[in-house]
Amino acid sequence: MADQSLDRVKFLTFDIFGTVIDLTGSLAAPAGEFLAANGSDVTGQAFYADWRERQRIEQYQDNLMMLGHSGYLETCRRAFVYCLKKHNVSFTADAVREFMQVYMDLQPYPDAVEGLRAVGARYKLVALSNGEQWYLEMLLSNNVPVEFDAIISVDQVGAFKPSPGIYRKAVQRLKCEPGEIMMVAAHSFDILGAQACGFKAAYVNRYNLPTEDSEYQPDIIVDDFVQLAERLLS
């Protein structure tokens, strides 16, 4: 049965990295190859878990220090270097620069493509992401075979999510009310930030993690995009 509280929703805004794009599947194996080539016995999976966690810290530090927005790819690079040092892996700046080209070929979760195509029949689809504008446009065009109605980067406000500016920018760009937007994300902090700005929210709990300990809780919780489409289109 459809949730009538969601009847006003016209736009679905999607987190991209980790929600639509399979970061672990795209990055763990290449990281493992880099580590092995540099004499480390740390697995790609173990390293990526540290890397992803560190990248979030890099983004939060970037917001808090207010010294200028570094950009998504730079925080990914900084986190990678930090974790190489943490695991005592030898490296050169040139080797890291070459390795970072892996970000040009990140691949989506298959269920994300299926679900996006399904919900696109009813809703406007909007990428709302921490990625750079040029990078998002390139990556989505090349690797995600779905047509987005708009692509909105945090570059436009100079701060990473969950800074409220990016959600407010979406409202401004889409010329709608906050309650006409539903944020779709696999990260609970993104859900929290969007709901604090008046959005509806769907938590795609890919990683079997809890929601935030907050009065803001998702309107919908699903395991993947196929379930999301079933809930929204029923």
Image: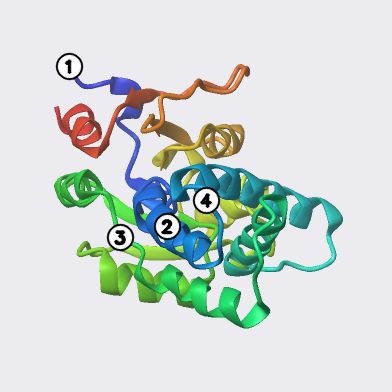
Q: Nearer the viewer, mark 4 or mark 2?
A: 4
What element does badge 1 sit on?
loop
Tell which circle, 2 or 1, labels the residue nearer the N-terminal end: 1
Task: From the image, tell me which residue sits under label 4.
Answer: 41
Residue visible at 72% across and 48% down? 60
Q: The residue under label 3 is which amino acid type?
A: Gln
**How far apart are the two marked residues, 2 and 1, measured between alpha carbons?**
39 Å
Q: Is residue 212 left or right of residue 22?
A: right
User: Element at badge 4?
Assistant: loop
Question: Disc 2 residue type?
Answer: Leu
Comparing 94 with 188, the one in front is 94
Q: Say whether disc 3 or disc 4 marks the residue closer to the N-terminus.
A: 4
Q: Of tags 1 and 4, which is closer to the observer?
A: 4
Which residue is label 2 attached to? Answer: 27
Q: What distance separates the C-alpha of mark 4 from that of mark 2?
A: 17 Å
Instruction: State the mark number for residue 107.
Output: 3
The residue pinned by badge 1 equals 1
Residue 89 horizontal/vertical position (percent): 65, 60
Query: Callout 3: few (<14), some (14-19), or many (20+) C-alpha neighbours within 10 Å?
Result: many
Crowd rating for badge 1 (residues with CA inside 10 Å; few <14, some 14–19, many 20+): few
Q: Earlier in the sequence, mark 4 or mark 2?
A: 2
What whole-number distance in Å separates the C-alpha atoms at marks 3 and 4? 26 Å
Q: Is residue 68 above or below residue 229?
A: below
Query: In this rendering, which labeled residue sits more in front, label 2 or label 3?
Result: 2
| Number of numbered labels in the structure image | 4
Q: Where is residue 52 drawn, in percent x and y?
A: 56, 47
Q: Nearer the viewer, mark 3 or mark 1?
A: 3
Residue 66 in the image: x percent, y percent? 83, 60
